[in-house]
Image (cartoon, rainbow, N blue to C red):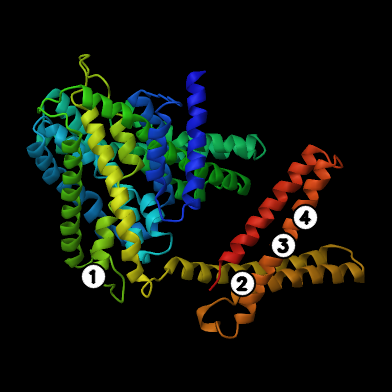
Amino acid sequence: MDILFSIIILLFVVALSSSLVKLLPFNLPAPILQIFLGALVALPPFNVNIRLNPEVFLFLFLPPLLFTDGWRFPKKEFYFLKRPILALAVGLVFFTILIVGYFIHWMIPVLSLPMAFALAAVLSPTDVVAVNAISGQGKLPSKLKLVLEGEALLNDATGLVAFKFALVAGVTGVFSFKEATGDFLLVALGGILIGASVAWMMCFIQNKIARFSHDEPGIQVIVLLLIPFLAYLLANEMAVSGVLAAVCAGMTMTYSQNVIKTSTASRLLSHSIWIMLEFVLNGLAFILMGLQLPHIMQTIHESQIENGTNSVVQLLFFVVAIYIAMLFLRFIWVYLANKIKNQDFTSKPPLPQLPVLLTATFAGVRGAITLAAIMAIPFLTSNGAPFPNRELLIFLASGVILLSLIVSSLVLPAVVKYFEAHISDPIHQEIIYANQLLSLEAIDAIRLRQEELLNQLDLDETSVEAINQVADNLVQIYERESNLTDEEIEKTSLAILTLNYEAELHIAGIKAERKLLDRLHLQHRISEPTFNHLLRDMDLRETLSENRQQRKV
């Protein structure tokens, strides 16, 4: 029961931290508060103490987080921005591992060179969720934002695969660059193939289950939830990259679900569940890090570290030095990459160069992926001996994560202000363009079906008029959507206002409906199933109206 009670406390702390962040009068990234609260509940009177098996920790956190990153990232933009993305996600990762690895080994001799490389590798992945939380959604130029998102997606894979190789080399003492390069390519390719295959196979199974279960969304979502874990496990069993398998499975989902059609109810439910799961796992990862900090600090304080120091001040100095070294290397790399043709991170017209460099540099925030990987270092080696310097590695990685969050939360909001006059949103323009085409197609379909109904049915004059009126009302809605183009913006201002007012009035009506529904339920004038059915219908209609209201020109 103790572990169940601890899990309940941690889930409550996740919800509490998200609420407290919004109530604070200043901008504080949620991960910083979650780390603090995690350390707090580890102390009396709470004394929450959870020590997950590292493999279990890795399995619970990495696959779903990597899967959602891969699923969310726009594939077309990834292709067009592949050069700057690969420059950061692959080139910068190996550049950082090499330079920072040697620097860490020189500064902390107790860490062998492979262990120093492992620490540099695990610190390579960046967290775009934390960057968006710090800078604010929609405040970065679109191209720069997509490059940073693409980097965060791919460097998770490259950094964690390199981390695994370095960790094995650190324990065994055996390392060959030539063999490691060949093995890296083999496990990377194997992980990609397995991830794509599992995604296609599970979507096919999901489609078959939907037919047999009469399109029951709950069963389909369960199958969907299994995909990242199955891809990760299967890849690990075949000695290839489970990390890349989870990422590739997520990236494949967009195409596989388009080919193997999924129902609307299944898509809505799965979207909600994945948002909730990502929110909980991100929060739990940082809270668990905070939970470990008092124990790590006590272990470091009580045990003599082999380099002859147990000074917390010196350890904090190491954290700061590692962070500054990584920040400096990132700035240099971004500066050089931005000078190369077809690898720049800006759009046309070009953005101010210094804000771009500073934003790309301080966007190197470390987050949940780094944390999940470093916490998964085993307690014992294969021969049963304690894993060398495990607490030191976790402390240094945790310190760099925390420091990167703090520094970026101070710098990024000030830097992104320079982009206010340069922000463009091609996604918004694409939505307007696609809505116009979709609306015209819908109008044609409505008119065609209207004619079919009038020809097929034997109707009196009143019924014919009713069908025509309903069709005209629907066509008017779609016509307002189709008129929202930049070229006709002046003469369609009334249509824009009409759409916004329509959404606001519809939401007001739904809220009134919901209040009455609550009263009917409390007064036992309607049954529980009736209440739930009508409430779900209202929620869906309100979501639709809110989405329409957000699509403003």
Crowdedness near tag 4: few (<14), some (14–19) or many (≥20) residues, C-alpha within 10 Å: some
**Residue that carries the numbered disc 3 in the rendered image:** 508
Q: Where is residue 288 in the image (x, y as percent from the top left)?
A: 39, 33
**Residue that carries the numbered disc 1 in the rendered image:** 353
- Residue 139 image-quadrant placement: bottom left
Crowdedness near tag 1: few (<14), some (14–19) or many (≥20) residues, C-alpha within 10 Å: few
Of 512 and 205, the residue lying toward us: 512
Earlier in the chain: of badge 1 and badge 3, it is 1
Q: Distance between the residues labelled 4 and 1?
A: 53 Å
Answer whether labels 2 and 1 touch (C-beta < 8 Å). Answer: no
Earlier in the chain: of badge 2 and badge 4, it is 2
Q: How far apart are marks 2 and 3 (CA)?
A: 21 Å
- Residue 440 image-quadrant placement: bottom right
Of 199 and 524, the residue lying toward us: 524
Taking the image as shown, residue 403 lies to the left or right of residue 288, namely left
- Residue 419 image-quadrant placement: bottom left
| Residue under the point 36% across and 43% down | 247
